[in-house]
Image (cartoon, rainbow, N blue to C red):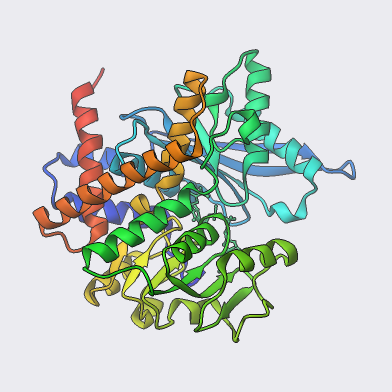
Amino acid sequence: MANEANPFESLQEQIDDASAYIDADDGVLERLKNPERVLETNLTIERDDGSLETLRAFRSQFNGDRGPYKGGIRYHPGVTRDEVKALSGWMVYKCAVVDIPYGGGKGGIEIDPEQYSEDELERITRAFATELRPIIGEDRDVPAPDVNTGQREMNWIKDTYETLENTTAPGVITGKAIDSGGSEGRVEATGRSVMITAREVFDYLGEQIEGTSVAVQGYGNAGSVAAKLLEDLGANVVAVSDSSGGIYNPRGFDARDVKAFKTETGSVSGHDEAVEEISNEDLLTLDVDLLIPAALENAIDAEIAEEVQADVVVEAANGPLTPGADDVLTGSNTWVVPDILANAGGVTVSYFEWVQNRQRFSWTEERVNDELEAVICDAFDGLIDAYEEHDAPNLRTAAYVVAIERVLDAFEQGGTWP
Ligand code: NAD
């Protein structure tokens, strides 16, 4: 990634920026900037060749004032304690901005999953689930997928937890396969909220999403679904990338076809409709209407931000802009829809999954998508109200003001004890 900004410091800076608009004690603001607790653990697992290996893993429970801790588990070589802390904090404010009754948490294992067989990944996941067991639970902390984890890992975690607890508790984790208690619409939920917020911000600006040109950095779950759904609205996906590079075609790609090609070959590079193979930095600075960073944190630093030509940036990834990049884009009047709203579809449908699990009742995909649409549109309207009311410098600060006020209300209503 372009810049090594510490994501935890970025989170704290975002909260500081918003706190100027909030009437709260410094002592309470400090609480909002730091996790309640972090589990750091070392998982010793057996490789297929019989050797033993120890992997570092974390779970951060940032804030539980509004409900159980909630947030994904990431498998990536770049996972650090500070990254997990930052991601867990963003979850708090994400759940608050869409007003679902959760706190925030996040977990990760420092691992490159491509170097491990499926059997090894199962042993690693079950070892992590065993360490997590005392601190997770349907009413305590509810993990979910994140980068490089998906239904398979969620099913293993649920099974490990239920076996050790000798119970049935599908709501201990979300993002499961449908037959293991997953929800219709969960796989596409993050990309769907990216599409909805992009559509809404263009509408707010008095423009139509139809006919806009779109560049997507990171063609995984979040990015590829967003691209497909935006294409369904008539947008033109002209550039996409993944960790191996990017492709460009000013006439636009067929988003579904590019996804099928990536699934088949492992990358978007080499797609036959590409007019040009481009670097990730080229993609970020293309002259497009809408830029969607959908890979990892710190994709855009201040230097790259100076070159960004898009009118609107919708953050599908968590933390893709450094604080310096944020300042540059605010200064150049680029509209940035912040991650804590734009990608909140994932946690919102995770919440719906948890509700269905607890009711032992399944919703149709149509109902899930309708309820998601309502939650994201309400949150977007609330964000615009806060932006206008506070005359906030950008949508991110307005989103944090909304979210922090909700967390503070819950904290103050509960009171300090002992
Ligand atoms: P994913 O693993 O499905 O996809 C990530 C994609 O990014 C891959 O295509 C990978 O090749 C690409 N990538 C990695 N490094 C890159 C680089 N340097 N340049 C360009 N592309 C690069 O992961 P995902 O679930 O789509 O998550 C992506 C982002 O969205 C993360 O920040 C994640 O936290 C966030 N997010 C995901 C969800 C979800 O439900 N999946 C929910 C909320 C937020």
Q: Relative to 191, is 85 above or below?
A: above
On the picture, is 150 further left or further right than 404? right
On the picture, is 89 further left or further right than 27? right
Q: Residue furthest bottom?
A: 275
Residue 180 in the image, given as x and y percentages of width and height: 64, 29
Q: Relative to 117, is 308 above or below?
A: below
Q: Quadrant of the C terminus?
A: top left
Q: Ligand 1, what quadrant? A: bottom right
On the picture, is 409 further left or further right than 233? left
Q: Residue at x 71, y 39 (%)?
A: 124
Residue 82 in view in this figure: no
Q: Relative to 73, is 201 above or below?
A: below
Q: Nearer the viewer, residue 45 or 287?
A: 287
Q: Residue at x 31, y 67 (%)?
A: 326
Asked where in the image residue 167 lies, by quadrant, the reply is top right
Residue 349 in the image, given as x and y percentages of width and height: 45, 39
Residue 269 in the image, given as x and y percentages of width and height: 66, 75
Count of marks overlaid on the render: 0
Asked where in the image residue 92 lies, by quadrant, the reply is top left
Q: Residue at x 58, y 76 (%)?
A: 246
Residue 187 in view in this figure: yes
On the picture, is 401 further left or further right than 128? left
Q: Residue furthest right?
A: 49
Q: Residue at x 18, y 42 (%)?
A: 26
Q: Nearer the viewer, residue 42 or 386?
A: 386
Residue 47 in the image, given as x and y percentages of width and height: 83, 43
